[in-house]
């Protein structure tokens, strides 16, 4: 078996939500949610053994409806939030709920490559522990994000028109809305991402074809990128190491990189997809690496060393200064590093592991989760 071979896990139902278990830095965990109108939905907790290529799973029932988004607390690995919807009395009921993963001894259910997650029946599934509901949203809840630090009591959410900041008291089971910003007229939110810089006081949001940053202390705009894409902006992300740099993607099939201080034109444009781009993510450890996923059924690994925090070195550099000949190692350059084509449907999300900088997972609508690795040659170009 090749070290870079993908590992495939199949959900019983369709899905579009995946997240790394953010508070877990020792082992590789991913959270995956299902979307089924006819059956009880599930949340899968997957532990991936990178050496054996085995997946160990725990499956929990998610009875409040289809899962459209998952976010995981950095401060408490057992806390997560889901955005969900269900049809109740011929009406769509949407909401967001904070859950705690129950402490249940995991059975020995390790699974090899191309495994399926459908062996358990709904009646045998343990339930998630409900911590609090985020009450008061207007319409469909598009996403939630946990504070990147702190004690795990703060998170934000967006629905069509509102950005809300919440304070969570997990002991009492209550979530209090601290503040709210509301869009005027026609524009609507489509996603939100917490900025890890500026003392975590800002978030970025996708608003129609533009990007809007918000200062959570005042709930006033912090920065704006007007017409960032020619069509709808689907996702935003912040460079973890360079405080003004960020990435966006959208329905114009493009991934763009920006400096918030010079928002009139992007720093770089990547034209690697042939359909809508749903997600873009910086590697949390090595900001030269960026993933994007699209409705063209592809996940692409981009190399962006020219915009990263790491200096670009040349293979001709003489480290010792004595003229001695070194083993040639071609430096990382901007461009597509790898294309991953294991999916056969729209890939709605791709997320990096919180524990291993070289592993990421992607999920397509048909319920196929694929765990991939950064190519070994790329890894050596960064490390050596």
Image (cartoon, helix red, strand yellow):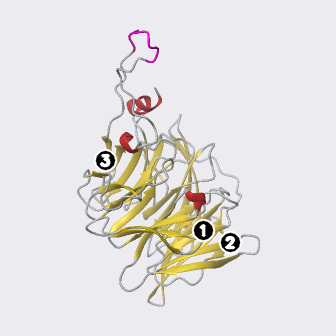
Q: Nearer the viewer, residue 212 or 144?
A: 212
Q: Residue at x 48, y 49 (%)?
A: 242
Q: Is residue 306 found left or right of 53 in the rendered image?
A: left
Q: Is residue 64 visible?
A: no
Relative side of 150 to 181, left or right: right
Task: Say few, some or many: other residues with alpha carbon within 10 Å of mark 2 (under 14 / 14 to 19 / 20 or more).
Answer: many
Q: Which residues are magenta?
A: 319-326
Was residue 26 drawn as part of the magenta stretch in this picture? no
Spatial CA span between label 3 and label 1? 34 Å
How many numbered marks does the figure carry?
3
Q: Earlier in the sequence, mark 2 or mark 1?
A: 1
Answer with mark 3 or mark 1, whichever residue precedes in sequence.
Answer: 1
Residue drawn at x 38%, y 40% as measured from the top left: 305
Query: Which label lies toward us, 3 or 2?
Result: 2
Q: Are there few (<14), some (14-19), or many (20+) residues within 10 Å of tag 3?
A: few
Asked if residue 243 can be seen in this view, the reply is: yes
- Disc 2 on helix, strand or loop? strand
Q: Where residue 195 sits: x, y (%)?
A: 52, 59
């Amino acid at each position: 078996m090749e070290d870079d071979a993908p590992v495939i896990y199949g959900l019983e139902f369709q899905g579009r939500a995946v997240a790394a278990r953010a508070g877990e830095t020792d082992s590789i965990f991913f959270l995956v949610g299902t979307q089924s109108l006819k059956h009880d939905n599930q949340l899968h907790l997957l532990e991936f053994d990178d050496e054996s290529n085995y997946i160990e799973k725990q499956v929990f029932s998610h009875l409040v409806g289809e899962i459209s988004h998952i976010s995981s607390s950095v401060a408490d690995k057992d806390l997560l939030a889901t955005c969900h919807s269900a049809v109740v009395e011929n009406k769509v009921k949407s909401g967001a709920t904070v859950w705690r993963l129950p402490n249940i001894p995991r059975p020995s259910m390790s699974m090899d490559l191309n495994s399926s997650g459908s062996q358990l029946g709904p009646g045998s599934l343990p339930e998630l522990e409900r911590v609090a509901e985020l009450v008061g949203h207007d319409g469909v809840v598009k996403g939630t994000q946990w504070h990147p630090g702190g004690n795990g009591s703060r998170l934000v959410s967006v629905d069509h028109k509102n950005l809300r900041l919440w304070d969570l008291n997990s002991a009492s089971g209550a979530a209090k809305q601290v503040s709210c910003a509301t869009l005027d007229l026609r524009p609507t939110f489509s996603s939100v991402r917490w900025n890890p810089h500026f003392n975590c006081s800002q978030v970025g949001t996708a608003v129609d074809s533009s990007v809007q940053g918000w200062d959570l202390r005042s709930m006033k705009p912090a920065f704006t990128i007007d017409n960032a894409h020619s069509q709808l902006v689907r996702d935003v992300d912040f460079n973890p190491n360079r405080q003004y740099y960020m990435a966006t993607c959208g329905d114009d099939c493009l991934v763009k990189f920006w400096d918030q201080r010079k928002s009139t034109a992007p720093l770089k444009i990547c034209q690697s997809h042939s359909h809508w781009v749903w997600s873009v993510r910086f590697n949390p450890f090595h900001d030269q690496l960026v993933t994007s996923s699209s409705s063209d059924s592809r996940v692409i690994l981009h190399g962006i060393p020219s915009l990263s925090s790491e200096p670009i070195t040349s293979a001709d550099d003489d480290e010792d200064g004595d003229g001695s000949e070194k083993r040639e190692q071609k430096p990382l350059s901007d461009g597509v590093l790898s294309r991953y084509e294991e999916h056969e449907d729209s890939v709605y999300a791709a997320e990096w592991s919180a524990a291993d900088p070289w592993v990421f997972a992607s999920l397509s609508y048909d319920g196929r989760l694929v765990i991939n690795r950064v190519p070994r040659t790329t890894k050596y170009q960064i490390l050596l």
